[in-house]
Image: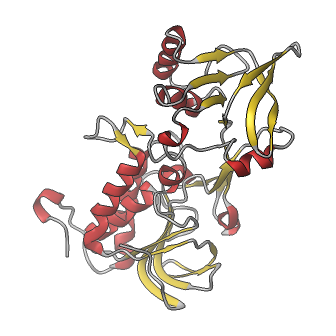
Amino acid sequence: MSEIHPTATLFTDVAIIGAGPVGLFAAFECGMLKLTSLLLDSLDEVGGQCTALYPEKPIYDIPAHPEIEAGALITNLERQIEPFQVPRLLGRRVERIDGQVGGFVLHTDRGEHIHAKAVVIAAGAGAFGPNRPPLEGLPAYEASGAVQYFVRRREDLRGRRVVIAGGGDSAVDWALALRGVAASIQVVHRRAKFRAAPETASQLDAAAAASEVELVIPYQLHALHGADGKLTQVEVADLDGLTRHLEADVLLPFFGLSMDLGPIASWGLDLARNHVSVTPSTCETSVAGIFAIGDVATYPGKLKLILQGFSEAAMAAHAIHPIVHPDVALHFEYSTSKGVPT
């Protein structure tokens, strides 16, 4: 369903803040319990990081999908909620929440007022942005696309000389994914040990041994060379200050994302290290009627996995049902027996 253009005031059972994979699945779980829901997201499209950062990146730990690209996962989740006609407000930020359980009012930066009986925060990493390397002249190279922090399409890098900087999962994953696409791949890291998953780190070592990837170790980014936003070389330096010049068309610095909860931090919720603390059995926050699921939520034993976020979406929806329908007993039924409600 496409984005709606609403009147100033909207009513729904559940307002879901965040339209990434976990937010989308929360809308499905609400629909299965005959709860109406509405999705809000500050991005202009659904999918969160899966769409904005790595739509072509394969995901391997989604049940029944040995491998699925992030963009395809979002497409399937959207198909899953089609029967419920879930409205969505995109390109909006929820600035304030008033009221209490059973009667919340969410105020957006575009002037809408959403009345909801319960709220689910599925904001992922919050407002996210890349950690940028401190290099002179960086903005000009960013503007031209010579420096990119996210890869939307592998084909955009076909035949180009790519330098990747970083030692985490993103750096290793993209070094492997761009084999056979980029003209050359050089990975710059300050030490020989990578922080990526052991299996992919081993694959990177094998790729280096096969001359598919060059590991530039131990080096760090030092300077960019080129003119008018066109990159020609990436200068790197080792711990002793000795430098190398790497021929390059594109630099991909993967130094993680900076997380900013934005207005969520001012809503009176208990926070722990920039995450929202919840009760594990229900995912309810310290404010009754407001729930948090996915990467934004924290509790003892929390794993930052999409599949755990899916489980949290189901738990939150079941905990919300008595808020919306206090006089209706919820008898758990398997989807195989009850089907999809209409």
- The colour mode here is secondary structure
Nearest the eye: 103 or 313: 313
Front-most of residues 15 and 235: 235
Q: Residue furthest top?
A: 209
Q: Residue furthest left?
A: 337
User: Where is the N terminus found, in terms of image quarters?
Assistant: bottom left
**Residue sitting nearer the eye, 52 or 273:** 52
> Horizontal and vertical percent for residue 316?
40, 61
* Left or right of 110 on screen, residue 23: left
The quadrant of the rendering that contains the C terminus is: bottom left
Residue 219 x/y as whole percent: 76, 19
61 left or right of 293?
Answer: left
Q: Residue at x 68, y 67 (%)?
A: 263
Residue at position x 70%, y 67% from top? 266
Q: Is residue 74 above or below residue 303?
A: below
Question: Residue 102 location in percent, x, y?
Answer: 46, 81
Residue 33 seen from this side? no
Residue 139, above or below 59:
below
Q: Which of 237/307 is in front?
A: 237
